[in-house]
Amino acid sequence: MGLLLVLRAPLPRPKSLRRATRAQRRARHRADAEEWATARVRGVLLDVSVQELLPLLNAAGGNRLPILGQLDPWSDGVLVREDLPQLDADVDRLGAVAGNDEERGLVAALKALLARWRDEPDLALHWYGD
């Protein structure tokens, strides 16, 4: 199970594919896969294991974290630019409690993603859960 964090332009309200044909759904999934591959190369995508993230979040304060504490790893959502200062503080708290190399690597990857977001102010941080 994973949580996909990606920087992308704010999206208009998505059209539902419930009534789409199989071919349309396959084309949409192919386009999404190509977008994720490009985002990974550009460094604006982070795939986080929920089993790795949740213990770190709980050690840092769990639900008391203003942004990360409210993040549901089994749903989708969007963080806007105004959330960046609080998200920075949350990631700093994660860094303070990171106890092993795996957790420190996750915190470093989150900080790199946030630094990239600061460089590209027209993007929003989307998360896609399992």
Image: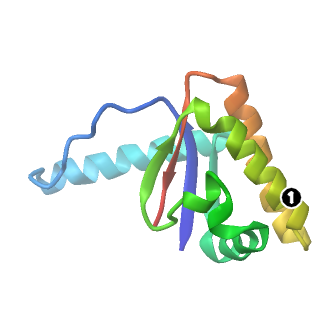
Could you tell me which residue is drawn at 77 percent across and 67 percent down?
60
Could you tell me which residue is drawn at 33 percent across and 52 percent down?
29
Could you tell me which residue is drawn at 90 percent across and 69 percent down?
101
In the picture of the structure, the residue carrying the numbered disc 1 is 95
Q: Is residue 24 left or right of residue 69?
A: left
Element carrying mark 1? helix
Image quadrant occupied by the C terminus: bottom left
Color theme of the render: rainbow
Image quarter for residue 125? top right
Rendering coords of residue 116 (x, y %): 72, 33
Residue placed furthest toward the front: 64
Rendering coords of residue 5 (x, y %): 58, 50
Rendering coords of residue 18 (x, y %): 14, 55
Q: Nearer the viewer, residue 119 or 71?
A: 71
Q: Is residue 42 left or right of residue 10?
A: right
- Indicate the amino acid at tag 1: Gly
Image quarter for residue 85? top right
Label 1 CA crowd tier, 10 Å (few <14, some 14–19, many 20+): many
Q: Nearer the viewer, residue 13 or 60?
A: 60
Relative to 7, does residue 24 appear above or below in the rendering? below
Q: Nearer the viewer, residue 122 or 61?
A: 61
Relative to 123, does residue 76 appear above or below in the rendering? below
Rendering coords of residue 72 (x, y %): 50, 64
Could you tell me which residue is drawn at 63 percent across and 57 percent down?
68
Q: Is residue 94 left or right of residue 28?
A: right
